[in-house]
Image (cartoon, helix red, strand yellow):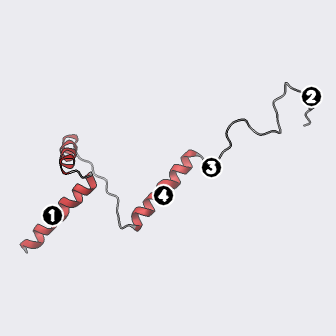
Amino acid sequence: MAKASSDRNTIDLFGKAPGRPRTQPLTRKDQLKLNKRAQREKEKSQGLKRLELLIEQDTIEKLDKLCELSGLKRAEWLTLQINKSAEKIKNKK
């Protein structure tokens, strides 16, 4: 298909698309998937393990209040409490 250089009504079939050039060849969905995989691998190399809990909303609110009072994140507070409980059990034996 040929295009005459004087033709101003036809869309430029052979030129570049207008707008900002793509800097990432992957779609946003693929970028997020790749970044999430990298994050999981990083956490795994740090010795961390993911944990999912299903608990009631009022329990979550209590947990958030306790975390706020101690200035810790949920994971940090839970880890601290587990370690304290483990120490108590260890000392009882």
| Residue drawn at the location 23% of the way across and 60% of the way down | 79
Residue found 21% across the figure and 49% down from its top: 67
Position of residue 45 measured from the top left corner of the image (x, y, whole percent): 41, 68
Q: Nearer the viewer, mark 4 or mark 1?
A: 1
Real-space CA distance between mark 1 and mark 3, rounded to the nearest whole angstrom: 47 Å
- Amino acid type for the residue under numbered disc 4: Arg
**In whole angstroms, how far apart are the C-alphas of marks 3 and 4?**
17 Å
Q: Secondary structure at mark 2?
A: loop
Q: Residue at x 11, y 69 (%)?
A: 89
Q: Nearer the viewer, residue 54 or 33?
A: 33
**Mark 4 or 2, nearer chain start:** 2
For marks 3 and 4, the one nearer the N-term is: 3
Task: Residue under label 2, please give it.
Answer: 6
Q: CA distance from mark 4 to mark 2?
A: 51 Å
The residue identified by callout 4 is 37
* Quarter residue 15 falls in: top right
Mark pair 2, 3: CA separation? 35 Å
Question: Is residue 10 toward the left or the right of residue 63 in the image?
Answer: right
Distance from Cα at disc 1 to Cα at disc 2: 81 Å
How far is mark 4 from mark 1, CA to CA? 32 Å
Labels 4 and 1: the sequence-earlier one: 4
Q: Which residue is mark 1?
A: 84
Q: Which mark is residue 24?
A: 3
Is 32 placed above or below 38 here?
above
In front of the other: label 3 or label 4? 3
The disc label shown at residue 69, or none: none
